[in-house]
Amino acid sequence: MSNSPVPNSPVPNAPVPNSPVPTPGQLPPRWQVRADFDEQTLVVYQAYPLRIARPAVSAQTLVAPFKRDRMTWIKPSFLWMMYRSGWASKPDQERVLGIRISRGGFEWALEHSALSHYVPELYANYEAWEAQKASSPVRIQWDPERTIHGDPLPYRAIQVGLSGEAVRRYVTEWITEVRDLTEVVMDLREHLRAGQLDDVFQCLPQELPLPLPSAVAAVVGAENPICGAVPERSPLRPRSPSD
């Protein structure tokens, strides 16, 4: 995560990383939450071994052997999840789950969070950041967004680390749907390896700037988008190129 402040202002209709790399004049704000969302929910991604993913799909939430006493990271960026998991190829990340959660729950997580490192623009002083970090069950990291090839982009994707009460709420209250996307991810991976980039681009989730309450956005330093229509709810994506 960068120590830089948040200098950019919203750019309407800016491309997101499921399109070719934008030119500098088209860049989204450096820190902005983008997600596949509707009026009530949004999709986050996690990658697990089969022993955790299979029971989660069956129960439609995370259950044992998933451990609630460990911090778990949720990611609204599909391509960042692909970078992190190697398109479902890294050990213990062989199954990619698309998890639909309530927007209210996601906003609670951001509101009760602390950044994982000190940013002077967001905290009164270093001691204030330390105090908030000590009392918060949620950690925020802004990591470089990724292209389909895993290359870093000059703007950030949010990663949300849940612990304690936040994990309990996530598992018991926020999750509304769990879907195993691994077969589709593997299909996309093969198209990527074959250089069939158009097939990959057209099947990625539509991740748009997510409007947040101003007070919530301020906690994490996120730029709010210029308001527009809420997208229609879509099935948990991505689609397979064979669909």
Image (tube, rainbow, N blue to C red):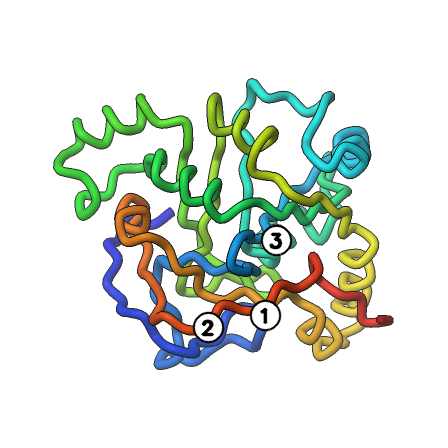
Q: Is residue 36 left or right of residue 59?
A: left
Of circles 3 and 1, which is in front? Answer: 1
In the image, what residue type sits under mark 2?
Ala
Q: Earlier in the sequence, mark 2 or mark 3?
A: 3
Q: Residue at point 47% right, 23% down?
A: 165
The residue carrying mark 2 is: 229
Local SS, label 2: loop
- Does label 3 or label 1 sit earlier along the sequence? 1
Residue named by callout 1: 18
Residue 19: name its quadrant.
bottom right
8 lies left or right of 128: right
Q: CA distance from mark 3 to mark 1?
A: 13 Å
Q: Which mark is residue 83?
A: 3
Answer with left or right where residue 186 lies relative to residue 152: right
Q: Position of residue 68 (x, y in %)?
A: 59, 21
Amino acid type, residue under disc 3 in the picture: Tyr
Percent position of residue 43, x then y: 59, 52
